[in-house]
Image (cartoon, helix red, strand yellow):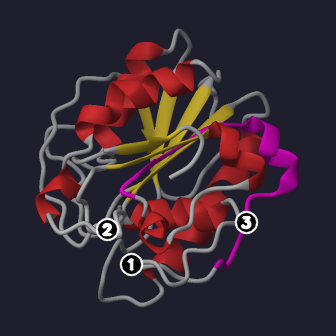
Amino acid sequence: MTIHRPHRVSALVAAAGVATSAVAVLTTGTATAAPNCADVHVVSARGTNEPGGIWSKFHLGTVVGNPVYAAINDALAGTVDAYRVDYPASLNQPASVQKGNQDLVDHVTKQAASCPNQRFVLVGYSQGANVVDNSIGISSVGAKVGGPIVATLPDRLESRIAAILLFGNPIRGIGKEVTGTYAERTYDVCNDNDPVCDPDGTDWNVHTRYARHADAAADFVTARI
């Protein structure tokens, strides 16, 4: 297992079920002004074909999104809510990553205007990590289920991005990682032998084993809020 703090899985298969018990408000679809703004807003991009999770009303993703959100909600003293990036998360739509990239940037920009004191945590698993990479200006072109950047978060919001959590980040498979402005705020984990992020990986089973890093990721967030 390799973890970069800062720096360094796209899912071709995601099939692990993780129950969560966090209590919070999930926003879906287009962001709207909320009467009560949570202190921290988690924005999560699921992996390719990753089920949302029938045991959780949050539906952020069974492999990463739900367990990571639950761990963050438990670890932080303030209020937390979440948003699932609206995109196909598909292998069959060539613009899947670009759609996720655009939705993430649009959502965070609108949410930031509605809640001027809110901080953000960006979470990406597998193809969803490509979505996050692109949104912070790190191109995923050439990576598994990658694609070109179509939108980036405005510079004025940079200070409000508290942490970026990436799991099975495909750009690691082509020797790239998050650099620059967001590097020190990035937790990027690649399970050993994961063929999505490990250039020498051959075991697809390990690509679904990222829930075990949820507490460590939450600790990373807590240290930066």
Q: Which mark is residue 144?
A: 1
Camera-nearest residue between 184 and 48: 184
Residue reaching furthest to the right: 156
* Image position of 179 with respect to 183: above or below: below
Q: Residues within 10 Å of mark 1 (few under 14, many from 20)?
A: many
The nearer-to-camera label among 3 and 2 is 2
Q: Residue at x 59, y 28 (%)?
A: 40
Residue 38 at x, y percent in the picture: 59, 25
- Amino acid type at image mark 2: Val
Verify CB contact (< 8 Å) between mark 1 and mark 2.
yes
- The CA distance from mark 1 to mark 2 is 7 Å
Pointer 2 residue:
196
Please report whichever mark, 3 or 1, sits nearer to the chain's N-terminal start: 1
Pointer 3 residue:
152
Q: Residue at x 34, y 63 (%)?
A: 198
- Amino acid type at image mark 1: Lys
Q: Which mark is residue 65?
A: none
Q: Is residue 64 magenta?
A: no
* Residue 179 as seen in the image, left or right of residue 144: right
- The CA distance from mark 3 to mark 1 is 20 Å
Q: Which residues are magenta?
A: 149-168
Please identify the quadrant where the N terminus is shown: top left
Q: Residue at x 74, y 43 (%)?
A: 112
